[in-house]
Amino acid sequence: MRRPGRDDTPDRLYTLTGGRSRAGSDAFDLVTLVVSEFEPTPGMQSEHTAILRMCRRPTAVVEIAAELRLPVSIVKILLSDLLATGRITARHPQTSRQPARLPDPTVLEQVLVGLRNL
Amino acid sequence: MASATSDTTDPTGPVPATGAPDPAAAPAGPAPAAGLPSDRTPLLSTASNALKIVVVGGFGVGKTTLVRSVSEIRPLNTEETMTQAGQHVDDNSAVLAKSATTVAFDFGRISLNEETVLYLFGAPGQERFWFLWDRLFAGTLGAVVLVDTRRLADSWYAIDRLEQHGTPFIVARNDFGGPHYTHQEIRDALDLLPHVPLVDCDARSREDGKAVLIALVQHLHRLATGQVY
């Protein structure tokens, strides 16, 4: 499949992701915290630039999606590109993704302390 | 950002003059300019572990109101788009398929300490949302099922699915001043297992929102330490 060029006018989301409709991996959770490791460079895709600016402080995938007004799955593809080139790092949730696995009681105790202090 | 499953207006859009869809919504004021980069409240640079809790419930039950009451940011809205291919979501070119379903959800967050941040998601309870559950909400700590006693049957499906997924949950009754049922009547109507907590709240109240979350986490702690099964 030919990668759509800059001057094509296919669906906007296809253009953003170079025709891909799935992330290379399930590397990103909704709440994976993304941190920029580099400043944007000239000529970079504008969404990549926006992500690198936004993630100077840790930013969850879902917040990036809300800010860019793009579906989460599209944002994950954009993030995989940046991760593959080392421009971002990802702080993944430490919670198990296995269904029916209960969280560590010490994590829950920390959550309770945090909630009570609100 | 049109979506049939969101029970809120676009948080960045104008506040509608009439017909507020969410009876529990806070009084409509002027919509603050939202979504602008200057509006963003960044996390601490030490933030490293994010947790999820999902608030699930029927249309207009006050999910976003509950999220808003405890969130440190004004709830944001985002969406996921996917085709519904049976139980197994095959996302091969699904994102752009014509039959794609869009599910919109709102979220807020609470920084718990220097490392840990809790994300709260308000998710629709409708049937067509659930095929996305595993993809979006795997690893969630637990769920709050928010119910309106005028429409208890709206939560049956959500409760079934949570039980099926093995996601621990509590039930919170948002007080709309509807018919007053006893807890036992609500438990019977929802066919709740005896160990599942049922609490009352006013979703607009920050203290109540906190209390609901604390009740959920205490329940999770009892489950995790084998105090209830």
Image: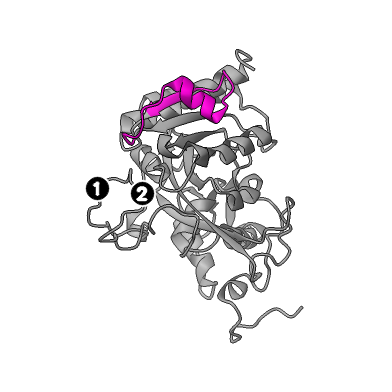
Q: Which mark is residue B22?
A: 2
Which residue does the image show at 51% across and 46% down from the upper left? Answer: B123
Residue B191, magenta (yes or no): yes
Q: Residues within 10 Å of mark 2 (few under 14, many from 20)?
A: some
Residue with the most extreme left position: B29
> Dividing the image into 4 quarters, which one contains the N terminus of chain A?
bottom right
Say whether residue A109 is left or right of residue B87: left
* Whole-percent x, y for residue A80 in the image: 64, 59
Badge nearest the viewer, 1 or 2 = 2
Under tag 2, what secondary structure? Answer: loop
The chain ID associated with circle 2 is B
Q: Nearer the viewer, residue B197 or B160?
A: B160
Q: Amino acid at mark 2?
A: Asp
Looking at marks 1 and 2 on the same chain, the residue that comes earlier in the sequence is marked by: 2
Which region shows up in magenta? B176-200
Instruction: For label 1, count other residues whose C-alpha is less than 10 Å away and answer few (under 14), some (14-19) or many (20+).
Output: few
- Quarter holding residue B32: bottom left
Residue at position x 52%, y 57% in the image: B79
Q: CA distance from mark 1 to mark 2?
A: 10 Å
| Residue lying furthest right | A1
Q: Residue furthest bottom?
A: A7
Disc 1: which residue: B27
